[in-house]
């Protein structure tokens, strides 16, 4: 049997450990197949962010191991709200979707698959 250099063996062990931790936490290792990403203009992103971020909007903490990225599954611990009728009228692409603020980012979520289809940052 061929021996691996020590640094390579350690690197493989770290990767294997990371996979085991992610699997144990129920987190996907890569984006899931779900609804396609929304193509939003910078102006639409600003409108979405401003309409979702209000003084009474709950800023959900990110669960351990969760990263807000397009294609990722949203854990049940994050409270999602339907997109408002006003926002859906202004930006028809988001009609029927759900939104939440996670770590000061707005995530737009497909309600059927619970996957993120857009992430809107405050500076956009």
Image (tube, grey):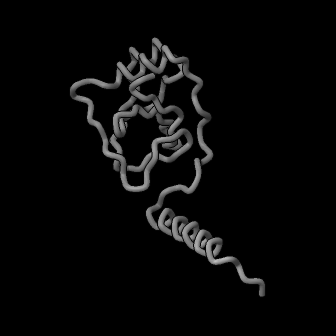
- Seen at 60% across and 69% down, the residue is 11
Q: In this view, does 4 lie to the left or right of 124?
A: right
Q: In this view, does 4 lie to the left or right of 55?
A: right
- Seen at 56% across and 42% down, the residue is 71
Asked whether 107 or 67 is in front, the reply is: 67
Is 113 rendered above or below residue 21? above
Identity of the residue furthest to the bottom in this view: 1
- Seen at 47% across and 21% down, the residue is 45
Is 47 rendered above or below residue 3? above
At which x and y percent is residue 104? 34, 34
Q: In this view, does 89 lie to the left or right of 10?
A: left
Is 7 rendered above or below residue 47? below
At which x and y percent is residue 18? 52, 65
Asked whether 88 or 16 is in front, the reply is: 16
Is 63 rendered above or below residue 39? below
Q: Is residue 115 left or right of residue 85?
A: right
The quadrant of the image that shows the N terminus is: bottom right
At which x and y percent is residue 59? 29, 37
Asked whether 116 or 30 is in front, the reply is: 30
Asked whether 51 or 80 is in front, the reply is: 51
At which x and y percent is residue 63? 36, 52
Identity of the residue furthest to the left in this view: 56
Q: How many marks?
A: 0
The quadrant of the image that shows the C terminus is: top left
């Amino acid at each position: 049997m061929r021996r691996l250099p020590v640094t390579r063996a350690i690197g493989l062990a770290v990767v294997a450990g990371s996979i085991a931790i992610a699997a144990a936490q129920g987190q996907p290792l890569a984006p899931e197949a779900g609804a396609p990403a929304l193509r939003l203009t910078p102006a639409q992103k600003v409108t979405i962010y401003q309409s979702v971020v209000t003084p009474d909007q709950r800023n959900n903490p990110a669960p351990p191991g969760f990263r807000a990225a397009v294609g990722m599954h949203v854990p049940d611990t994050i409270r999602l709200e339907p997109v408002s009728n006003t926002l859906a009228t202004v930006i028809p692409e988001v009609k029927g979707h759900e939104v939440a603020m996670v770590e000061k980012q707005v995530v737009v979520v497909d309600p059927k698959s619970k996957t993120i289809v857009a992430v809107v940052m405050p500076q956009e």
